[in-house]
Structures are given as C-alpha cells and as structure tokens.
C-alpha cells in the first residue's frame, strides 16, 4: 500500500474513531487535509461560509448524535472566528474535535500576517490542546483528541496541525486506542447526603442538567419526587432535553432573577444532578448572585464524570421509589391561535403543528421563554437551546442537528438580531438540502436588552440608547436574505398566514424560512 502522508493518516484516524462528519472552512494551511478528504472515502464534508457556522454546526451535530464531529479551521484567526459557538458547545458539554491548520514549522519566524498563538486561542474554549510536531505522531495525536472529546461529560479537543506534518509521509503507526474512562458513580457519602435531605420532611428540589434531561433519567427523577414529595427543575440552560408525549414533564429554573429567587425562597435542600448551582445569568444592583435562600443545604450529588442515569437509578432504589410509575405527558390537541401575531401566538402555532419526533432549536431569547407551557402535551420532541449566551448559535445548531438526524424535522425558533450573526448558515442548509424550518421572530430589536436596561436600573432611556437596541432604519428583509442563499421563504403578519406557511414548510423537504412579523 502507498505510504500515507500526515493528513491522510489524520482522516483515517478520525474515521476509525467514528468521527465521520467534518464541518469546514479551510485555508491554505489546510489544503493537504482537503486533498486527503477527497482521496479517502467515508467522511461527509460540510462547508460553512463563516467559522461560527462551522463550530455551531458541530455543536448541534454532537448534541443529537452523542458523538463528535470534526471542524476544520484556518490558523488563529479562523479559530478565533469560531470561538463564540465553541463557548456555547463547551457549556452544552458536547464532544467536539477541532482540527486547526498551522504554518509550516520554521515559517513562524517570519511573522507573516496570519501568524498567531493558536494554542493560546484554543485554550480559552478547549479542555485539551495539542500541536502535532511530526507526521509520524499525527495518528496517535488524533486518537488522543477523540478520546478526550468523548470523555464525560463531553469535551472540546483541539488538534493543531502544522502544514509540513500534513504533507510529509508518515511511518506506519501502532494500533490506536479510542477507549475512554469508564463512567463513575457518586461516593456513598454523597448518596447518603441526598437521601437524608429527601427523607427530612423539608422542602427539597432536584435540579437536573446534562444527560439527566433525557427520557429515561427523567422518568427515574419522576419516581423519586413522587415517593419523597420533592420537586424537580431543569437548570435554565441545557444542551438537550427530551420532552413531549410519553416523557416526563419538567420546568426550567426561571431566567429573571426575581422569579428565580422566588422559586427557591422556601426550599431547604437543593440536590444537583448534572447541574450547576442555580444562579442568574448576570449580576444586578442589589440582587443576589445565587438563587438559593441563605442557609439552604446544597448537595452536589454528581461529578462531571458520573453516569447520571445510573445515579438516578441508585437514588431511586435508596429512597424506595422503584415501584412507582413515572408521570408521563399525555398528548393533547393544542388550539391554533388566531388574529394578531405575537410572540406567544408564534410559540403556540409551532407547538400545535410540530410533527412527531421534531427537533426544536431555540434561540428566540426572550420570546421563547413561554415555549415550555405552550408546548405541554405536544408530540415527543427534542429541545436544544442557546447554552452559553453567545448569540448566533441557532441557525448553525439547526444545521448540525439536521445532518445528525436527516430523517427528522428541525424547527429553529430564531431571534431576528441573533440570526444576523450567522445568517450564512442558510446557504449551507440549502446546499445540503437539510430539513430545517426557521421561524424568525421579527420584532425588529434586541428585546432582551430592553429588559436588561431596566434590570440594571435604567428606568428610561433616549434615542441614542434606543438605536443600540433596535434593528430598524433600515428594516431587514429575512425573506430576501434567505432567497439570496437558496432557501425558500415567506413572511407572515397574522396567525392565519403563519399557520398556512408552517403547514407548507413542515410538509415539504428541504429548508424553509418564515419571517414572523410580530407587532406590525
């Protein structure tokens, strides 16, 4: 067999480690890898026209596939352009392997224009960073990156590949190891602390996050709260939740700080299972940094490496809840709204018309906070949301989710301001013929920031501040933007038109965009 170069051994290693999708925005330093992708069959290559699309799509893919995709990025600036959605991916705890091209070893002394500290940039969002120094090491380095990415709870690994390690012939390598550490369980004393709280007779809340929000772990949590009288909540920001008919309903911790404080006001014990300590997203004048009442008992039951479903199963056994049937959502017909188009009416329409097994991607920010009550009793679906607060994730995340699950419809509830960060993702959706329906909440502004102005004490504001919060003058036409990138699109000014368009979009293959002109 002809000797492989470093780039070719990299592709072979990725495929051997079951990383068979590459979201790419390559440049000169990555051309050997591009050639290898073309030469070696098995890798699906998806071009993004901006690095934020590439990293956001890899995030959405991993959330639904439960395995990493790779990205292909160009030097320090290319990686830097993708950092915002790597931040969201890190917060979603997904596995992801970044491949970043670097100058030929020795060339950096020239300080040419694209020279930068790639490792320094990578470390801001990566759990593991390594630069290959020889074509002979590329396969082993790539296998290590895959192992690191697949380690619980899901990590970002970045492998930096100087151009000469890509084009130089590589010696045959030893057998590669892709195994990851076995998932753990909490220590006995952690279980004992949780059981003691649950049997105390005082108010207890289980706060769930991560993979505890899948259907089977949620059913176990339902058994526990029924047996003990506790309550349960999801943390506010989550990578993926399984909801709808036949699954256990769970509410999220409220986003507004006052509502969150009220939720935990009388709670004596908070047990964390895959979740962080409940806290508001920002600090506000005169408001607390944590939502728990002072003096409440915090039980951090799980560590990042723990198996959350097995942890809940063990906890259910310890409190005697295993014989209790979980409470599951029952399907109900959801009424279609009529008349004026409001954010709530858009949510109610999506809830009523989503098909079975849809994937809902939510970057509607403030508008989407009512989605959970609006969608109670909807068909079974997966819910993906903005996890790190870095807007511009919805369109790319939808793209990656659709590639991971081509047989399922993806509905992206998208804020108008957020969409403009990564609008290029529509082009990728058109090129890949993805089943994505995007609904733009076109309220012509950053509505969330109006609330934040009030939250920090600015009760009134004038024209200059308003110009920082609105996206009018000129108005943006999302229909024209979508059509310019090959996506069929239409706008709705009322509920009746929205219903008609959504029914059409759901029934047809390929991407479709609906501009929901709210309050026009």
Image: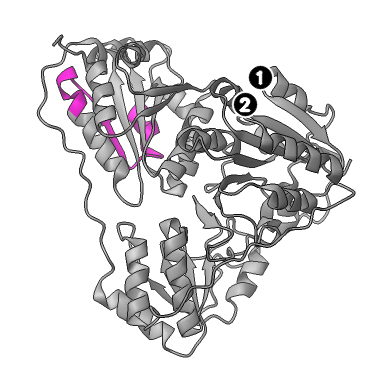
The residue carrying pointer 1 sits among few (fewer than 14), some (14 to 19) or many (20 or more) residues within 10 Å by Cα, namely some
Q: Position of residue 24 (x, y in %)?
A: 44, 22
* Residue 485, numbered label: 1
Mark pair 1, 2: CA separation: 6 Å
Residues 345 and 153: in front is: 345
Up-down relation of residue 47 to residue 202 (above or below): above
Up-down relation of residue 313 to residue 227 (above or below): above
Q: Position of residue 455 (x, y in %)?
A: 71, 58
Q: Which residues are magenta?
A: 118-139
User: Which quarter of the rendering shows the C terminus?
Assistant: top right
- Asked if labels 2 and 1 touch by Cβ distance under 8 angstroms, the answer is yes
Residue 432 visible here: yes
The residue located at (58%, 82%) in the rendering is: 266
Among the 4 quarters of the image, the one containing residue 330 = bottom right
Question: Pointer 2: what residue?
Answer: 426
* Magenta stretch contains residue 134: yes
The residue carrying pointer 2 sits among few (fewer than 14), some (14 to 19) or many (20 or more) residues within 10 Å by Cα, namely many
Q: Position of residue 208 (x, y in %)?
A: 47, 64
The residue located at (64%, 62%) in the rendering is: 331
Up-down relation of residue 188 to residue 203 (above or below): above
Residues 91 and 454: in front is: 91
């Amino acid at each position: 067999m002809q000797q492989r170069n470093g780039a070719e051994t990299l592709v072979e290693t990725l495929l051997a480690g079951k990383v068979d999708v590459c979201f790419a925005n390559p440049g000169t330093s990555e051309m050997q890898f591009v050639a290898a992708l073309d030469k070696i069959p098995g890798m699906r290559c998806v071009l993004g026209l901006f690095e934020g699309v590439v990293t956001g799509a890899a995030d959405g893919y991993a959330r639904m596939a439960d395995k990493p995709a790779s990205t292909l990025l160009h030097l320090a600036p290319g990686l830097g352009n993708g950092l915002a959605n790597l931040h969201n991916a890190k917060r979603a705890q997904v596995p992801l392997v970044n491949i970043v091209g670097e100058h030929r070893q020795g060339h950096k002394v020239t300080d040419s224009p694209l020279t930068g500290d790639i490792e320094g940039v990578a470390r801001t969002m990566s759990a593991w960073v390594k630069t290959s120094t020889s074509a002979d090491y590329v396969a082993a380095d790539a296998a290590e990156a895959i192992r690191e990415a697949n380690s619980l709870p899901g990590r970002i690994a970045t492998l930096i590949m100087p151009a000469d390690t890509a084009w130089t012939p590589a010696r045959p390598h030893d057998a590669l190891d892709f195994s990851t550490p076995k998932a753990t369980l909490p220590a006995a004393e952690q279980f004992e602390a949780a059981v003691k709280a649950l049997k105390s007779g005082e108010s207890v809340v289980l706060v769930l996050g991560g993979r505890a929000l899948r259907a089977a772990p949620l059913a176990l949590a339902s058994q526990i709260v029924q047996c003990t009288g506790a309550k349960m909540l999801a943390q506010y920001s989550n990578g993926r939740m399984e909801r709808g008919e036949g699954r256990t309903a769970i509410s999220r911790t409220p986003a507004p700080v006052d509502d969150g404080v009220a939720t935990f006001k009388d709670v004596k014990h908070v047990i964390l299972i895959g979740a962080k300590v409940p806290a508001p997203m920002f600090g506000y004048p005169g408001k607390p940094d944590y939502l728990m009442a002072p003096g409440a008992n915090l039980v951090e039951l799980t560590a990042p490496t723990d198996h959350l479903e097995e942890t809940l199963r063990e906890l259910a056994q310890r409190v005697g809840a295993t014989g209790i049937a979980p409470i599951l959502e029952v399907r109900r017909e959801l009424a279609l709204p009529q008349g004026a188009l409001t954010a709530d009416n858009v949510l109610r329409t999506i809830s009523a018309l989503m098909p079975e097994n849809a994937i809902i991607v939510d970057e509607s920010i403030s508008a989407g906070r009512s989605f959970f009550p609006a969608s109670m009793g909807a068909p079974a679906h997966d819910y993906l949301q903005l996890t790190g607060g870095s807007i511009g994730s919805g369109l790319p995340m939808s793209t990656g989710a659709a590639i991971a699950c081509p047989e399922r419809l993806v509905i992206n509830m998208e804020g108008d301001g957020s969409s403009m960060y990564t609008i290029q993702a529509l082009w990728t959706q058109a090129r890949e013929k993805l089943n994505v329906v995007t609904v733009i909440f076109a309220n012509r502004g950053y509505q969330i920031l109006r609330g934040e102005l009030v939250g920090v004490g600015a009760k009134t504001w004038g024209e200059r501040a308003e110009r920082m919060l609105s996206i009018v003058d000129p108005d943006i036409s999302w229909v024209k933007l979508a059509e310019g990138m090959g996506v069929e699109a239409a706008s709705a000014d009322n509920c009746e038109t929205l219903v008609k368009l959504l029914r059409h979009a759901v029934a047809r293959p390929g991407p479709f965009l609906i501009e929901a002109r709210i309050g026009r």
